[in-house]
């Protein structure tokens, strides 16, 4: 499987989740995984991925602007994905709030992309993190689950 993980981040926690999911995906031999910042990704590259995983921190109850823009531009991008899954990081009580909004936006702009899993929502201990201990193992596990 060829997978792409695209993340937005302010303090680095969502990047860390992206990298750990990537580690999980790579546990299955033959899988290739690219982990890229939403700020740096070239959407004009001619690549088709079996799976695109998109992640964002929760800012004011939703995914961040750069991630919204990436999703919005997917229909006209050269980069393609056959299926998707999402993840977020949040503080407080906003479990799965941004993942649900991302899923909704992706399904709206790319109705043919298949959702392969419900989203992963990872809690951070404060605005700048870190990821709470109990949620840390869930990141790699999510990658392992998606790899199968
Ligand atoms: C401007 C701003 C708004 C935020 N709003 C929320 C919020 O509404 N709900 C929430 O659970 N966390 C909120 N947070 C906390 C972020 O979710 C947390 O900073 C983020 O998960 C850390 O990820 P990062 O290191 O990848 O930036 C907010 C953070 C910032 C900076």
Image (spheres, grey):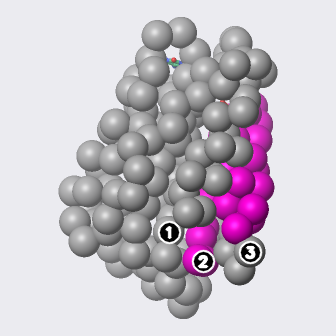
Q: Is mark 2 within 8 Å of ligand 1?
A: no
Sequence order check: which comes first, mark 2 or mark 1?
Answer: 2
Given contact means CB atoms under 8 Å apart, are the residues at marks 2 and 1 in contact? yes
- Residue that badge 1 annotates: 51
Magenta region: 1-28
Given contact means CB atoms under 8 Å apart, are the residues at marks 3 and 2 in contact? no
Residue 79 visible to the viewer: no
In the rendered image, residue 144, in percent from the top left (x then y), is placed at: 64, 53
Q: Is mark 1 within 8 Å of ligand 1?
A: no
Residue 92 or residue 82, whichever sits in front: 82
Give the vertical position of 120 relative to 109 (above or below).
Answer: above
Residue 37 or residue 66, whichever sits in front: 37
In the rendered image, residue 140, in percent from the top left (x then y), is placed at: 70, 45
At x 59%, y 62%, the residue is 147
Label 3 vs label 1: CA separation? Answer: 16 Å
At x 33%, y 73%, the residue is 75
Asked if residue 15 lies in the magenta stretch, the reply is: yes
Q: Is residue 29 left or right of residue 100?
A: right
Q: Is residue 128 left or right of residue 72?
A: right
- Residue that badge 3 annotates: 29
Q: Quadrant of residue 101?
A: top left
Residue 124 or residue 144, whichever sits in front: 144
Label 3 vs label 2: CA separation? Answer: 11 Å
Q: Nearer the viewer, mark 3 or mark 1?
A: 3
- Residue that badge 2 annotates: 2
Q: Which mark is residue 26?
A: none
Q: Quadrant of the N terminus?
A: bottom right
Residue 112 visible to the viewer: yes
- Ligand 1 position by quadrant: top right
């Amino acid at each position: 499987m060829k997978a792409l993980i695209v993340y937005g981040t302010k303090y680095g926690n969502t990047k860390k989740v992206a990298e750990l999911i990537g580690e999980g995906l790579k546990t299955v031999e033959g899988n290739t995984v690219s982990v890229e910042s939403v700020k740096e990704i070239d959407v004009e590259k001619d690549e088709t991925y079996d799976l695109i995983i998109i992640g964002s921190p929760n800012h004011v109850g939703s995914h961040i602007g750069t991630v919204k823009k990436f999703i919005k531009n997917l229909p006209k991008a050269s980069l393609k994905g056959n299926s998707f899954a999402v993840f977020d990081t949040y503080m407080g009580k906003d479990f799965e709030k941004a993942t649900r909004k991302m899923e909704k936006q992706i399904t709206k702009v790319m109705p043919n992309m298949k959702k392969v899993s419900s989203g992963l929502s990872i809690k951070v201990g404060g605005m700048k993190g870190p990821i709470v201990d109990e949620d840390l193992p869930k990141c790699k596990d999510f990658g392992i689950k998606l790899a199968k």
